[in-house]
Image (cartoon, rainbow, N blue to C red):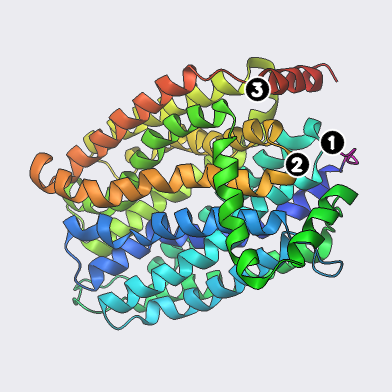
Amino acid sequence: MKLSKPKLSFWQIFNMNVGFLGIQYSFGLQQTAINPIFLYLGAPEDMLPILNIAGPVTGLIVQPIIGAMSDKTWSKRWGRRKPYFLIGALLGSVCLFAFPHSPVLWFAVGLLWILDVGNNMAMEPYRAFVGDKLPEKQLSLGYQMQSLFVGAGILLANGSIVLFQYWFGGESVEETGTIPQWLYYSFFIGAFLSLTTILYSVFKTPEIPPADEELEEINKIKSLPFSQRITQPFTEIIDAVKEMPKFMWKIGGVYLFQWYALFIYWQFTTPLFKKTLGYTTSEAASQAAKMSLTYNTVTMLVALALVPLTLKFGGKKIYALSLLGTAVALFAIPYISDPTLVLIPMVLFGIGWAAMMGIPYTMVSKIVPQDRRGVYMGILNMMIVIPMFIQTLSFGPIYKYILGDNAINAMLFAGVFFAISAFLASRLNVPKTAIDTDVEVAND
């Protein structure tokens, strides 16, 4: 039986998602600044995929476990999801402060592992947090609001990189083993935002207490011996996978190609601009930041506009078209030699990013049971990190031996994978419950 949840105002939904700003600022730095730091510290380009393996491994392990644990957590003082994204934000904040001080490559790689644990620990319960609080009629707004903050966080991260390089950078000679001083400031801002934005949402948004049946189950688990409590999340994950709706398996097929392609884009944008624009690593990293700045600005502008479009035309169609537009953007980028004109395809990329960060979560949240929302959101995020894991292991050899160590070919490869994901998304059969909800909202 579903609990009746009160309808929240626009600003209540806004406040509960502010914490996503800090989380996504951190992810923005990972997308744009981490790989240049690896290059500054002497990493070869074909090693970039394997050096990023922390993301998929920690996501694969941390997100479903934290999701399962948060489903079975309740504290009158701290709530259900909040303890987890508070601890994750604190861990991420410490790592962001330390990252630009990395003296050698192995130290930076180790920090990335810890940072990813913190980010995943904070982000996964946040997805379930929105589903817990909002009635079905407001789920689309809630998740697209998260998409807006995804754009805002990454926008601020990359904007700060561009701004600080302009103010304090301009090194004409790059010294291997040295991270430019201007890059430090963006990480310090991230360390501050990671914690403060989470705290804002924690104090502004109370959690809904679990139903009596859920509370009884939670107390039952608390009474188990310690050894059984340790294994309980793993048992919950296994059971959830066995009973997972078929729709989620189909989403997994879309995600396989979508996220493999995204990881290629993030890893090889800097090497691409070194080749196509003749830039140094610092100049190429700045251009990559401008690209991210552009597409995340678009994401911010269109995120909420996608809500009425998905209600009118259906999430499947908007999602598939957005992925196709992203493919077109990646096909175009390698053939544009003007650093200003190369920003134009980012309009399509930004629309796609807004759809990717909101629409699938709305679909899934409507079809999974309330008492398992955390674990299923964790499993959905497993479907993100599994393609990333595959990419980190497979794409280095592909890049070196098949694509000829050529970043242009890498970007075209990613475009093909986005086109495949668009085709698979167009064949998603949206569950009847989700269709009925959308129609009900559209007619509201």
Q: Is residue 260 left or right of residue 294?
A: left
SS at mark 3 in the image = helix
- Whole-percent x, y for residue 182 in the image: 39, 74
Q: Mark 1 — residue?
A: 2
Q: Earlier in the sequence, mark 3 or mark 1?
A: 1
Callout 2: helix, strand or loop?
Answer: helix
**Residues drawn in magenta:** 1-7
Circle 2 residue = 370
Does 110 lie within the magenta span? Answer: no
Numbered-mark total: 3
Residue at image mark 3: 309
Q: Kindly identify the amino acid type of the residue bearing the numbered disc 2.
A: Gln
Seen from the viewer's position, the closer of residues 379 and 265 is: 379
| Mark before the other along the chain sequence, 3 or 2 | 3
* Residue 333 percent across, percent down from the top left: 29, 36
Q: Residues within 10 Å of mark 2 (few under 14, many from 20)?
A: some
